[in-house]
Image (cartoon, rainbow, N blue to C red):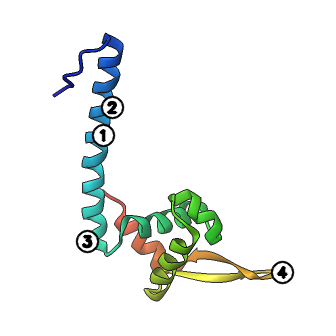
């Protein structure tokens, strides 16, 4: 189903493509959230795990922009994942204020299991 917009042909095609893209994104998001729910993750928790799996250890200030979330929210999410034994905080040598977050072996396994098949 397209749009009822009656503008120029190029505008109608662009709007129709946008509508289809939004519907596709919504469908994929629902499937992903269902798969993550089975593993006990929120999409943002999984975003942290996925970033650490593919990029290696990161600092909270590096995770926030990748997930489009605030640093305080990253800290809360890392706390939750750390309580479950999925990540650990390691001090950054030479700066006691900074930590790097890394996956534990259990976190690596859980992240790989959660990837949609």
Rendered location of residue 77, percent (x, y): 47, 76
Rendered location of residue 38, percent (x, y): 25, 71
Q: Name, please, the residue furthest toward the bottom.
A: 83
Residue 33 vs residue 101: left or right? left
User: In terms of depth relative to the viewer, which is nearer, 19 or 84?
Assistant: 19
Rendered location of residue 13, percent (x, y): 31, 19
Q: Which residue is mark 1?
A: 22
Residue at the image point whose x is 43% and y is 70% from the top: 45
Q: Which residue is mark 4?
A: 94
Q: Which mark is residue 18?
A: 2
Q: Name, please, the residue furthest toward the top.
A: 8
Mark before the other along the chain sequence, 4 or 3: 3
Mark before the other along the chain sequence, 3 or 2: 2
Contact between marks 1 and 2 (CB within 8 A): the answer is yes
Distance from disc 4 to disc 2, alpha carbons, whole Å, reads 49 Å
User: In terms of depth relative to the viewer, which is nearer, 70 or 117?
Assistant: 70
């Amino acid at each position: 189903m397209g749009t009822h917009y009656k503008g120029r042909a190029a505008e109608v095609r662009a709007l129709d493509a946008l509508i289809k893209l939004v519907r596709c994104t919504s469908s994929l998001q629902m499937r992903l959230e269902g798969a993550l729910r089975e593993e006990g993750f929120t999409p943002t928790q999984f975003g942290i795990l996925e970033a650490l799996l593919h990029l290696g250890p990161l600092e909270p200030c590096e995770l926030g922009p990748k997930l489009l979330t605030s640093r305080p929210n990253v800290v809360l999410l890392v706390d939750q994942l750390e309580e479950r034994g999925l990540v650990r905080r390691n001090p950054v040598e030479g700066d006691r204020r900074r930590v790097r977050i890394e996956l534990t072996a259990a976190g690596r396994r859980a992240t790989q299991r959660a990837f949609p098949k």
